[in-house]
Image: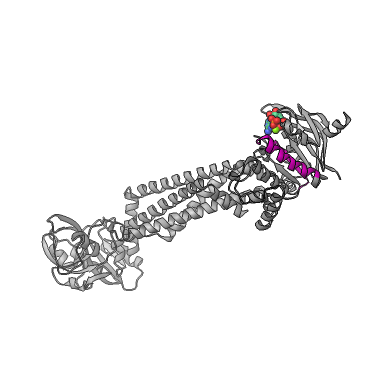
Amino acid sequence: MIKIAIKMLLGDRAKYLGLVFGVTFATLLMAQQVSIFIGLMSRTASVVNDVTEADVWVMDSRVRYIEEVEPLRDVELTNVRSVPGVKWAVPFFKGLSTIRMPDGLTQQVQLIGVDDVSLVGICPKSYMGDPESIRHPQTAMIDKNGYKFTWPEQPFKLDREIEVNDNRLTLSAICDSTPTFLTFPTIYVSYATAVQITPQGCNKMSFILVKSAGTDPKVLADRIGKQTGLQALTQDEFAWRSINYYLTRTGIPINFGITVFLGMLIGAAITAQTFYIFVIENLKQFAAMKAFGVTNGQLLRLVLTQAALVAFVGYSLGIGLTALFFKATSNSPAMRGFFLHWQVMAGSAGIITIIILISTIFSLRKVFTVDPAVVFRG
Amino acid sequence: MTIAVGVSNLNKQFKAGDSVIQVLMDITLQVKLGELTMLVGPSGCGKTTLISIMSGILSPTSGEVVVMGHSLNRMKDREKVLFRRHNIGFIFQQYNLLPALTAAENAAMPLIAAGIGNDVAINRAKDVLQKIGMSSQVDKLPNQLSGGQQQRVAIARSLVHNPKFIVCDEPTAALDAKTGGEVMQILREVANDTGRSVLIVTHDSRIHQFADRIIEMNDGRIASDHYPALVEVKE
Ligand SMILES: Nc1ncnc2c1ncn2[C@@H]1O[C@H](COP(=O)(O)OP(=O)(O)OP(=O)(O)O)[C@@H](O)[C@H]1O
Ligand SMILES: [Mg+2]
C-alpha cells in the first residue's frame, strides 16, 4: 500500500513538484529569516558577550542597552573597587569615533578602549600581530572586516597609519571579532589612548567591568548597585537587556515576524491547496478503492504516506538551501556569524508538520466521506 | 448452491430536501451462479441503485440482501467493506484505474488491499491479465492503453481476488461495438465457464445477445424477467 501511495504521488509529476515547492519555500523562508533574526539579535549583545573575563557590568542608571553610553566619573571606579566581593574593577571605553579613509572621506567606527594593564575586554581572537602591543601609546588594533572595509582589496598588513578623530595611530594588530549589530569597523586601543584621542574633556569611562572574588555575580551586582547608586548588571542580564531593547523598541522583530509569517502562510497555502486538489482529483479512484474493499484506515495511511513524503522531501530541500545560503554568504561581513541553529531546524520541522497535517485533515475529510456508491454514477 | 445474490421485499428511498423519492419498490429477485444477468430499463428507473444495494455499497431502506449466503443487513459498514473485499468484483463504466500504476498493479489492487504482498499480488494479476489476452500489456500505464484494454484491466481487477459475484455498471458504454463485444465475450466466459454470477447494468442493446437472462426494470419495479435463449427455443 505504501508503494502504491508513493507511485500515485510521483505519478502526478506536476503536482508533486508543486507540493514539494510549497514546503521547500515555506521551510527556506522560515529557517533563513529566523536564523538571520537570531543572528542579528545576538549581535546586539556581542560586545557584552565578548568580554569573557568580567562578571558584572557597572553603568549609569539611565543606560538601557549596550549602544547607549552615559559617561561615568573617575571617582566611581574607586567606589566600585571598594565594594566587598569585588576582586578587580577596570574601566571600559566604548564610543563612536570617525576615521579618515584613504580617499579622504570619513567613516564612523566603534572605538573600544580597554584597561592598559589588564586589557580586559579586548577582542578575544587575534588574527595578526600582538594584541598586547596596543599598550603602547598611539597604537591600535582593528578587526578583520574593518580592515577590509577601510582598505578594500588590500592584503592584511601591519604598521599602517590610521587616523582616528584626527589623531594618527599605528596599526599594530588585527583581530577577528564577533560582528556587532552596527557593522562599523571596530578599533581597539588602550584606555589611555582612548582618553587621549576622544575630544570632549573629562568623562571617558563608559562602563566599569568587575570580576567577583567568588561572590555570586547577581548578589555582587545588587551589592554594587546599592552601595554606589549605579546600575550594576551581570553579564547575562546586560546581554539580554540589549537584546530585549531591540526586540521591544525597534520594528525589527515585527519586520522579521511578518516575513516569516508570510512565508509560512504562502507555503502552507500552496501546499494545502495543491494537496487538496491532488486528493480531490483522485476522489473517484478512492471511491472505487473503497468499493472493492479498501478501508478508511488504509486510505488514511495512503494519504499520510504521501503527505509525509512531500513534507520530508520539501523540508530537506528547504533546510539544505538555507544551509547553502549561509555557507555561501559566510564571508560577507553583513552575514558573518549567522548560521542555521538546530532549534530553528527543529522549529521549522514542527511547523511544516503542522502545515502538512492541516492539509491532510482537510483532504481526508473528503476521502472519508466519499460514498463508494458514487463510482457507479457518471 | 446456485444462488449468488438474493434480495427480498427491497425498498429504497432517497430524501431530497423535504420530499422523499421512492426509487426501488418491493423488489424480490435472485441472480444465479454460472449466469450472465443483464439489468435493463429506462434512465432513472433504479438500476444503479439496485446493484449498489446488491453489492453492499448502499443500504436499503427496507428488505433483505443475501450475498453468497451471508445477509448484508446485519453487517456494520466496516464488515461490509471486508466482505466486499473477498466476495464481490466491481467493473465501472469509467474503469477507474489509477493513472500512475501499471496494468498489473491496478489489477492487483484488491489483493494489495487485502494485505497480500506486492510481488505475489502482481504475479497473480499478471496471470489473470494473461487469461484475457493482455499478457503483452501488463507493464503499461492506463494512458498507454486503449479503452477496451483499460476495461480488460478493470475486468482483471474484478476477478483477481476470485469473487463469486461480479457487478458491472455500463461496462461497454465507453467502447465501440467491436471492442464492447470482445469485453462482453470475456464476461460471458467468466460467468459460464468459471461458475460466477455476473450482473451487468446496460443501456446498450447491441450487447443483449451476450445475456443468459435479461431483467427489465421500470420505475423502481421489475417489469419483465426472461431467458432469451429459452424464448427463442419456444418460438
Ligand atoms: N443519492 C441520491 N439521492 C437522491 N436521489 C437519488 C440518489 N441516487 C439516485 N437517486 C435517484 O434515484 C433514481 C434512480 O437512480 P439510478 O441511478 O438508480 O437510475 P439508473 O436506472 O441507474 O439510471 P441511468 O440509466 O441513467 O444510470 C433517479 O431518479 C435518481 O435521481
Ligand atoms: Mg445507472
Query: Which quadrant is the C terminus of chain A positioned in?
Result: top right
Q: Which residues are magenta?
A: B163-192
Above or below for A317 versus A50: above
Seen at 41% across and 56% down, the residue is A321
Q: In the image shown, does A20 or B183 lie closer to the viewer?
A: B183
Residue A290 placement (x, y as % from top left) = 67, 45
Q: How is the image coloured?
A: one colour
Give the x, y percent position of residue A265: 45, 45
The number of discs equals 0
Asked whether B83 falls inside the magenta stretch, the response is: no
Left or right of A326: which side holds B132?
right
Taking B216 as reference, is A213 above or below it?
A: below
Left or right of A73 on screen, residue A45: right
| Along the viewing direction, whichever of B202 and A67 lies nearer the viewer | B202
Looking at the image, can residue B136 be seen? Answer: yes
Q: Quadrant of residue A205?
A: bottom left
Q: Taking A376 as reference, is B26 left or right?
A: right
Write the residue at 51% across / 52% down: A310
Q: Residue furthest front?
A: B178
Look at 71% across and 40% down and name the residue there: B182
Residue found at the very far right of the displayed protein: B234
| Relative image position of residue B25 (x, y in whole percent) | 79, 29
**Which of B53 and A231 lies nearest the eye of the viewer?**
B53
A87 horizontally vs B202: left or right:
left
Q: Position of residue B117 (x, y in %)?
A: 67, 57
